[in-house]
Amino acid sequence: MANCLGDADSKGTRMSRKLFLVASTVVATMPLLAVAQTSPEMNGTLSFSTTVTNGDAQKSKQTAFNFVSDIVFSERFSLGLDVDYGRVNPSGTDAPNATLNRIQLEPTLSFGNGSYVGAYYQYASGAISIFSVGLESAGVFAGYDADKWAVEGYAGRTSMDLSFGGGDMSASNIGLTAFVRPTDSLEIFGHAAQANLRDDAGKIKIFAMGAQYDFDSGLMGYVAAETVDFGDIFGGTGSQVAFGFGYDLAKWTPNMRGTVTFEVARNHFEGGMNNNAVTIGWLIPIGGAKSTPLSSVARTARGGTRAPFVAGVGSLGLLGTLNPS
């Protein structure tokens, strides 16, 4: 057990260093990307956010860094790069901190008719007190974007390295995401996924949906809801409903860049744990990317995180709910 914990801690430390190195490199090279006239080009979003959670038994504060990007090498080929870091700090209690790290790579091949195919590799690690888990996921995906609507599906596998003596676990994953865009300002989206654990050990199911509307004044509003069913594996069902809005600072003054966001959410976890969460964020677009909330269940509803367990626990609002009180 001690060796297992030591290995898990070492992996978590190495992963944190890698995440910070990648994030620092990206931030440092942003000015060069902005003025570069040759390919590759980068489209993406940086997000910094703070969430205050007021629960039935405790309060907590969460800080998060999220980076989602596509590095476009040509009309046919691009490479997706995601980096996430979140930390939950309970206030005024002896409860432990919770952390989550994630990095994902997605090489994608696009065709001229709106269809595309690709593969993904993702590593995520989370820790609460002496409990830690590392999740390595890989798979393939394919989709079609017809402008007014879009659909994408993926299939893959996740291997889980548990630190509490349970050994390794693995699961096969499948997921589907759909978008409808009735107008240039309105987007409606939904995501469903399921993980089947090896040896009939159980299933993890996730369903999320949401909508975003962009006003000409620079305001945008969104709503999203998510349900994660962990079955008997991790203690039942968790859910969240979130409402938020954002304002493009460039509409106020051209010298300001980015979108400030404000979100309120209600979390519920089976067994009676409930809390309210308020999130303030700052989204910085890169290239031609659209500003969408990243530290929100709205991201899960867009299919932004593959593998149901990672998408469920990794929805940073739910991470506070799962933190023991």
Image (cartoon, grey):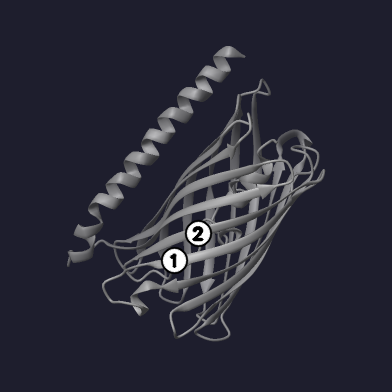
Residue that label 2 marks:
280
Residue 285, image x and y in percent? 36, 65
Q: Kindly state the secondary structure of the residue where label 1 is placed.
A: strand
Q: Amino acid at mark 2?
A: Ile
Per the rendering, the mark at residue 260 is 1
Q: Characterize the local packing of mark 2: few (<14), some (14-19) or many (20 or more) Cα atoms within 10 angstroms.
A: some
The residue under label 1 is which amino acid type?
Answer: Val
**From mark 1 to mark 2, how far is it between C-alphas?**
7 Å
**Any part of residue 186 in sight:** yes
Let me know if residue 312 appears in the view: no
Q: Nearer the viewer, residue 312 or 262?
A: 262
| Residue 160 vertical position relative to residue 63 in the rendered view, above or below | above
x and y, in percent, of residue 66 in the image: 44, 52
Q: Is residue 253 above or below residue 154?
A: below
Instruction: Identify the residue shown where x is 49% and y is 65%.
Output: 261
Asked whether 171 or 300 is in front, the reply is 300
Which residue occupies the foreground of this view, 16 or 119? 16
Q: In x, y percent, where is residue 15?
A: 43, 34
Residue 274 place in picture, x, y as percent: 74, 49
Q: Is residue 282 above or below residue 188?
A: above
Q: Is residue 53 left or right of residue 124?
A: right
- Residue pictured at 44% horizontal, 84% vertical: 217
Asked if the residue at tag 2 contacts the one at tag 1, i.e. Cβ–Cβ closer than 8 Å, the answer is yes
